[in-house]
């Protein structure tokens, strides 16, 4: 039977420590907030007051409730004030020797049955615990920033943590209204082990000048629905903190190159470019601690008012009959372009026609489109099953099956049919655009235009230039994307482009974590949704996208990059072989037959 924890101590009143103090005080639990000096204590108290006052100003907290919260917090310098608390949580900088010294002192000060907890996000809880004479009473309690808002708490047990200590902390989290996941002591735990490989890879993209910082961040926000782009998130976390976490996970986690800090991160730390807290990181801010980004020498100049010769594009050909092709036909027709929709046969043409009509009708019912606009859009579409009908279009978008041989055959035919100078675009999500381009005699006119599904809803389009793509073709692609009301991001021709190159290795890492029996499907999904603000957990997303699609993309990434960490997880391959490919099959990582 778990005991009730009635008083808590918090050591370290930085952003995280002050947030943890607020969480306990808001939930009626008395807190002793401790720092090492009066100056640090004043800063921590100011952080807490600022957070509570903002809640009052926003009407989320009454002045009376504010006073009650402050009444539950006692501030003190030195560990002596913690002699009678039931639980101590440390939130000091992420340095193992510092935490070990701290726990050795807490072991001497705190009462014998007190639980000692660390808020470390990546260090070994076991190594911290052995600095005490009570390692069985040491546990990891990892809150996420901002602690008052984020619902997740990772509870980390070591091989010697007493079961009753785990039960006590789990019960405490429930009292705090938090969702906990209880896991074993492993580098990065769940959330950071999955998050920081992705962040590190995003920095590598920037370092290699594969895409700009703005395009990388916009791609992940708009393409995946993430609350922040990876580089802006690194600035928020702190580049130095990110380096320490990555370095720890690399050393403790089997030296996986996904976690080896890319050189640019170390260079930025050395140069003092630590993110928001110093006013300069991947972006430049109005001042230290400010969230407001200001232009700097890396900021791209404003786009010209007219991108390319937009007037030269009036008729667009769309080749394909799948969901993506249908969406692009609708988007282009609604944007005022004449569209020639080409499929491989009458049944496919009928299916595309009915799907586009139904989608437009739905938009009318929802009040997003008038009946007149619907009729006008439909009037702009010509339905065909002959590629020869594309002989007079101004731009072609191919959206056939994701097989290189099929796409090359289509492009070879388009090369013969289309007028000179017509831009030929492929919507491939992972195949080499240059290989498709070289099936034509006009590789300079070939570009990647990777729309996201559903095309009428998703704002992002990745504009992929090969080493043969001309500036004129890129400008025409820019003009089209702008005219469609979409946001275009530019990248070079590499497998996965931006979004898939960052997204699918993260999903593969989650499968490997499950495969190792480290955490359950539900706990991993909870960790990423509640701890990182992701709209879907990795296994929810995999079941939605399709495990077969994920496996195909991951194989392409591995074949191109040859990084061992990119090799598809065996469990993913086994599930696909068994036919468990996600929602469309009724079963993937979860059983969907009864949902």
Image (cartoon, rainbow, N blue to C red):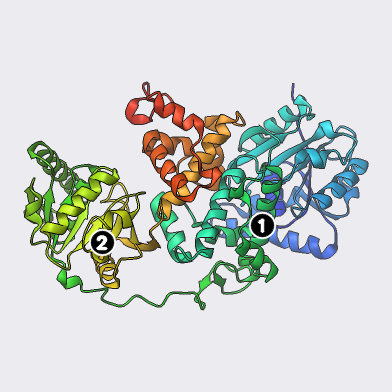
- Looking at the image, do the residues carrying marks 1 and 2 touch, with CB atoms under 8 Å apart? no
Q: Residue 354: where, in percent of width, then height?
A: 12, 40
Label 1 or label 2, whichever lies nearer to me, is: 2
User: Is disc 1 surrounded by few (<14), some (14 to 19) or many (20+) residues within 10 Å?
Assistant: many
Q: Residue 584: where, in percent of width, then height?
A: 32, 30
Answer left or right for 185 relative to 391.
right
Q: Residue at x 72, y 57 (%)?
A: 14
Q: Residue 96: where, in percent of width, then height?
A: 79, 49
- 442 or 472: which is nearer to us? 442
Q: Secondary structure at mark 1?
A: helix
**Residue 446: mark in rendering:** 2
On screen, residue 323 above or below 582: below
- 282 or 118: which is nearer to us? 282
Residue 338 placement: quadrant? bottom left
Residue located beneath label 1 in the image = 243
**Residue 188: mark in rendering:** none
Answer left or right for 439 relative to 239.
left
User: Is disc 2 surrounded by few (<14), some (14 to 19) or many (20+) residues within 10 Å?
Assistant: many
Q: Secondary structure at mark 2?
A: strand
Residue 306 placement: quadrant? bottom left
On screen, residue 495 above or below 57: above
How far apart marks 1 and 2 lie (CA) works out to 40 Å
Q: Earlier in the sequence, mark 1 or mark 2?
A: 1
Answer left or right for 334 relative to 542.
left
Q: Locate the N terminus and report the quarter of the image it occupies.
A: top right
- 545 or 247: which is nearer to us? 247
Answer left or right for 201 relative to 176.
left
**Residue 522 visible in this rendered orientation of the protein:** yes
């Amino acid at each position: 039977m778990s005991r009730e924890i009635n008083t808590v101590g918090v050591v370290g009143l930085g952003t995280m420590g002050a947030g943890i103090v607020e969480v306990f005080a808001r939930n009626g639990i008395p807190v002793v907030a401790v720092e090492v000096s009066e100056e640090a204590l004043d800063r921590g108290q100011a952080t807490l007051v600022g957070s509570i006052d903002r809640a009052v100003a926003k009407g989320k907290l009454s002045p009376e409730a504010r006073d009650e919260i402050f009444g539950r917090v006692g501030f003190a310098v030195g560990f002596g004030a913690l002699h009678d608390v039931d639980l101590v949580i440390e939130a000091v900088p992420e340095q193992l020797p510092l935490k070990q010294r701290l726990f050795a002192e807490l072991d001497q000060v705190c009462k014998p049955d007190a639980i000692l907890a660390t808020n470390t996000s990546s260090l070994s809880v076991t190594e911290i615990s052995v600095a005490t004479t009570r390692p069985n009473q040491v546990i990891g309690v990892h809150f996420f920033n901002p602690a008052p808002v984020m619902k997740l708490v990772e509870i980390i047990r070591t091989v010697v943590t007493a079961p009753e200590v785990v039960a006590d902390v789990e019960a405490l989290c429930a009292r705090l209204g938090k969702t906990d996941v209880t896991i074993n002591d492993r580098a990065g735990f769940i959330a950071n082990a999955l998050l920081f490989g992705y962040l590190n890879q995003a920095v590598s993209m920037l370092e290699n000048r594969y895409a700009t910082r703005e395009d990388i961040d916009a791609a992940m926000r708009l393409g995946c629905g993430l609350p922040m782009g990876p580089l802006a998130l690194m600035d928020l976390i702190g580049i130095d903190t990110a380096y320490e976490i990555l370095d720890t996970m690399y050393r403790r986690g089997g030296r996986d190159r996904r976690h080896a800090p890319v050189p640019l991160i170390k260079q930025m730390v050395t140069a003092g470019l630590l993110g928001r807290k110093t006013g300069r990181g991947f972006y430049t801010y109005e001042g230290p601690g400010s969230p407001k980004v200001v232009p700097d020498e890396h900021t791209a100049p404003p786009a010209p008012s007219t991108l390319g010769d937009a007037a030269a594009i009036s008729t667009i050909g769309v080749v394909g009959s799948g969901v993506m092709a249908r969406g692009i036909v609708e988007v282009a027709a609604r944007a005022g372009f004449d569209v020639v929709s080409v499929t491989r046969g009458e049944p496919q043409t009928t299916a595309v026609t009915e799907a586009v009509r139904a989608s437009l009708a739905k938009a009318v019912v929802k009040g997003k489109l008038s009946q007149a606009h619907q009729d006008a859009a439909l009037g702009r579409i010509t339905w065909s099953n002959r590629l020869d009908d594309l002989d007079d279009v101004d731009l072609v978008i191919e959206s056939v099956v994701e097989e290189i041989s099929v796409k090359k055959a289509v492009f070879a035919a388009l090369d013969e049919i289309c007028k000179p100078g017509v831009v030929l675009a492929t919507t491939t999500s992972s195949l080499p655009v240059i290989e498709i381009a070289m099936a034509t005699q006009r590789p300079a006119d070939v570009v990647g235009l990777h729309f996201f599904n559903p095309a009428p809803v998703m704002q992002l389009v990745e504009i992929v230039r090969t080493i043969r793509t001309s500036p004129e073709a890129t400008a025409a692609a820019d003009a089209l994307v702008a005219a469609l009301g979409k946001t275009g991001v530019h990248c070079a021709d590499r497998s996965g482009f931006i979004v898939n190159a960052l997204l699918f290795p993260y999903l593969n890492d989650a499968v490997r974590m499950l495969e190792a029996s480290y955490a359950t499907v539900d706990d991993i999904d909870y960790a990423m949704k509640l701890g990182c603000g992701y709209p879907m957990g990795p296994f929810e997303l995999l079941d939605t996208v399709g495990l077969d699609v994920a496996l195909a993309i991951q194989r392409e990434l591995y074949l191109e990059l040859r990084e061992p960490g990119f090799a598809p997880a065996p469990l993913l391959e086994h599930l696909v072989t068994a036919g468990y490919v996600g929602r469309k099959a009724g079963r993937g990582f979860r059983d969907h037959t009864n949902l």
